[in-house]
């Protein structure tokens, strides 16, 4: 945890903020009691009494509101209090949907990637040497194996399947004409076109099955091949060295070839858009399920440590604004 975040969640800062807010409320209460006991509440003391009384009301109201977010005030199970512990799961779902709708919008992410010309930066990283450059082949193997074991590659497979199906649809006529042209001259063109149509439909059917079935045979085969390749990268020094060399050369090409940079940028932008589209629901589910596993009281404590210090300023402001409102109302009453 970095220093700014650690400071935000420091329990000591939260305690100090609570003491300040409570101290201001106690000062208003003591001032009210002193005026009531020691004066006749006339003249200027009437203004002080009205301000102190309203300050207590404002401070108490905001204390109740802030406390009700995290627990039952005075441990009394008043309805619509302890909102965060009671509504924890719903808050997790809403948080996931908020992030899904506002941070994983495919077009916004694609524009963000495009603005940063990722191909050139990727080329510099791939071509760099030493610690600043590409990780070793075995490290790449471990990373790939971790992705496969965690299922993180599935969104990439989903995007590839969708991209392949879109390619078949968009290039139907080009592919048909090419297949017909390459067919033997003694077969009728009508038969060639019929064979191509059946083949095209069959391939799209396989892609549709892969898209709808997470346990499709081809998906499982892809998992196996990726897992085997990851293990070979970790154990086969020659393979690891070849992969590192190829990637380093690719990095050098990306740095020097503007046309290649543009093509890779376009591919990355498109890939990010597709990945974001497929990952939206998964991100929301991950956040919602993670929050659902948290203990209700622990969740409330986590959130209070993060935002509770700022909420204490609501209590302070409520006390001060209440005092000003009481002062103004007392002045208006005197002059009516």
Image (cartoon, rainbow, N blue to C red):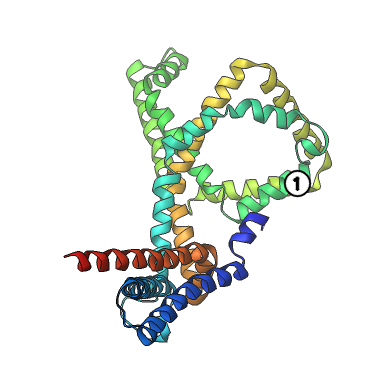
Front-most of 24 and 142? 24
Quadrant for the N terminus, please: bottom right
Front-most of 166 and 13? 13
Query: Where is 301 relative to 328, above or below?
Result: below
Displayed quadrant of residue 83: bottom left
Residue 94 visible here: yes
Locate residue 89, reporting x and y percent. 41, 68
**Disc 1 element:** helix
Displayed quadrant of residue 118: top right
Who's the residue at 16% across and 65% down the image?
336
Locate residue 164, reporting x and y percent. 46, 33
**Apparent side of residue 259 relative to residue 233 in the rendered image (left or right):** left
Locate residue 245, reporting x and y percent. 78, 30
Displayed quadrant of residue 33: bottom left
Locate residue 62, reporting x and y percent. 38, 70
Who's the residue at 77% across and 46% down the image?
138
Pointer 1: what residue? 139
**Apparent side of residue 108 relative to residue 327 in the rendered image (left or right):** right
**Apparent side of residue 315 relative to residue 41 in the rendered image (left or right):** right
Query: Where is 131 relative to 319, above or below?
Result: above
């Amino acid at each position: 945890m970095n220093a700014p975040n650690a400071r935000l969640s420091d329990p000591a800062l939260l305690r100090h903020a609570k003491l300040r807010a409570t101290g201001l409320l106690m000062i208003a209460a003591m001032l009210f009691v002193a005026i009531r006991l020691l004066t006749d509440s006339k003249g200027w003391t009437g203004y002080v009494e009205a301000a102190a009384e309203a300050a207590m009301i404002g401070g108490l109201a905001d204390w109740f509101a802030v406390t009700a977010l995290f627990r039952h005030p005075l441990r009394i199970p008043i309805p619509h209090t302890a909102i965060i512990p009671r509504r924890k799961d719903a808050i997790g779902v809403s948080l996931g949907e908020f992030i899904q709708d506002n941070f994983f919008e495919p077009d916004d992410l694609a524009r963000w990637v495009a603005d940063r010309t990722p191909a050139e930066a990727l080329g510099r990283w791939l071509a760099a040497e030493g610690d600043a450059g590409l990780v070793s082949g075995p490290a790449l193997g471990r990373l790939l194996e971790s992705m496969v074991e965690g299922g993180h590659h599935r969104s990439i497979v989903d995007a590839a399947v969708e991209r392949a199906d879109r390619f078949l649809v968009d290039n139907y006529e080009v592919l048909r004409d090419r297949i017909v042209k390459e067919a033997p001259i003694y077969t009728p063109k009508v038969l060639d076109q019929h064979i191509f149509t059946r083949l095209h439909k069959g391939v799209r059917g396989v892609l549709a099955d892969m898209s709808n079935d997470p346990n499709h045979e081809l998906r499982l085969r892809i998992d196996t091949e990726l897992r085997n390749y990851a293990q070979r990268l970790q154990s086969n020094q020659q393979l690891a060295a070849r992969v590192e060399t190829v990637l380093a050369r690719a990095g050098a090409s990306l740095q020097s070839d503007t046309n290649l940079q543009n093509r890779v940028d376009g591919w990355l932008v498109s890939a990010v858009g597709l990945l974001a589209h497929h990952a939206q629901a998964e991100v929301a589910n991950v956040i919602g399920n993670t929050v659902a596993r948290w203990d209700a009281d622990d969740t409330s404590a986590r959130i209070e440590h993060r935002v509770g210090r700022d909420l204490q300023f609501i209590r302070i402001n409520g006390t001060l604004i209440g005092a000003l409102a009481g002062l103004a109302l007392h002045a208006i009453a005197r002059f009516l």
